[in-house]
Amino acid sequence: MCRHLGYLGPAAAVGDVLHHGGHSLIVQSWAPNDMRCGAVANADGFGAAWWPDSGSDGDPTGPVAATLYRSAAPIWTDRTVDDVLTHTRSTAVLAAVRSATVGMPVVATASAPFVDGRWAFSHNGVVAGWPHSLAGLAAEVPVEDLLRLPAATDSAGLWMVIRHLLRDHDPVDVLRRVVTALDESGPGSRLNLLLGDGTTLWGTAVHHSLSTSVTDDDVWVASEPLDSDPLDGDRTWEPVPDRSLIVATAGSVTTQPL
């Protein structure tokens, strides 16, 4: 369920990132190739987070807060993508299109990415046994934070847990901890998690598809390759092995087993 992407590289229009490739994120909203569930489209909202362009060299002087646009409408119906986001440039973008799990609300606040300061987060998949399976991890989160849950969904709940853990822990450790805990409490969960801070992307592939494409000066991470044919497009796409964690910066990506 859902599709997401992350981009790091030379400054580009946010709208162009969403349109990038013959199998762009926008195309994946109505014609995904590898959903691994009963859904056939990602029409329950979308969102994009980006970080202010730090200049022509693309090197930020320090952490900057992410900017966010979200909607409960299908991405192909929202003129903001072409009328506004094509005029908004950034060296880092994290975006998602949503297919809501049955019974979960279709509202803008349920659409990824979720942001807090420099952090942006997206979840592609489902937490099996939610909400009970997430209760153990959520017990560590201050009640005041839980009362600010942006939406009554598994992805928003995951975000509240991850946001809390990021206050004291490294992103790699946080993602490992969350996946390990849900392996036990929610077996069968599909946990493609994507986290960014404007300079680095961290992602997991757990029972769902994820691919990367890297050149000397950029990197793309996406649920599905953005070229119509990943073997015959403008870029080379590599599938991320199941149960793996990636760390990506502009021009590089490393993969390690979970």
Image (cartoon, rainbow, N blue to C red):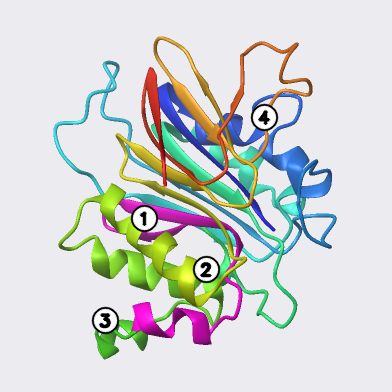
| Depth order, front residue of 216/244 | 244
Q: Amino acid at mark 4?
A: Pro
Q: How far apart are the alpha carbons under marks 2 and 4?
A: 23 Å
In the rendered structure, which disc, 2 or 3, sits on the residue that comes first in sequence? 3
Question: In the rendered view, does 227 fall on the left or right side of 63?
Answer: right
Q: Is residue 77 magenta?
A: no
Mark 4, mark 1: which one is toward the viewer? Answer: 1
Q: Report which residue position mark 2 lands on.
A: 155
Q: How far apart are the alpha carbons under marks 4 and 1?
A: 23 Å
Graded by Cα atoms within 10 Å as few (under 14), some (14 to 19) or many (20 or more), the crowding at tag 1 reads many
Q: Over which residues does the magenta segment extend?
A: 113-138
Q: Report which residue position mark 4 lands on.
A: 225
Q: Is residue 114 magenta?
A: yes
In the rendered structure, which disc, 4 or 1, sits on the residue that comes first in sequence? 1
Q: Residue at x 59, y 29 (%)?
A: 16
Q: Residue at x 26, y 81 (%)?
A: 140
Q: Amino acid at mark 3?
A: Glu
Q: Report which residue position mark 3 lands on.
A: 140
| Depth order, front residue of 257/9 | 257
Q: Report which residue position mark 1 lands on.
A: 175
Q: How far apart are the alpha carbons under marks 2 and 3?
A: 17 Å
Give percent across and percent down for residue 241. 56, 36
At numbered mark 4, what does the secondary structure look like: helix, strand or loop? loop
Q: Amino acid at mark 1?
A: Leu
At numbered mark 1, what does the secondary structure look like: helix, strand or loop? helix
In the depicted structure, whether residue 72 falls above or below residue 209: below
Graded by Cα atoms within 10 Å as few (under 14), some (14 to 19) or many (20 or more), the crowding at tag 2 reads many
In the rendered structure, which disc, 1 or 2, sits on the residue that comes first in sequence? 2
Mark 2, mark 3: which one is toward the viewer? Answer: 3
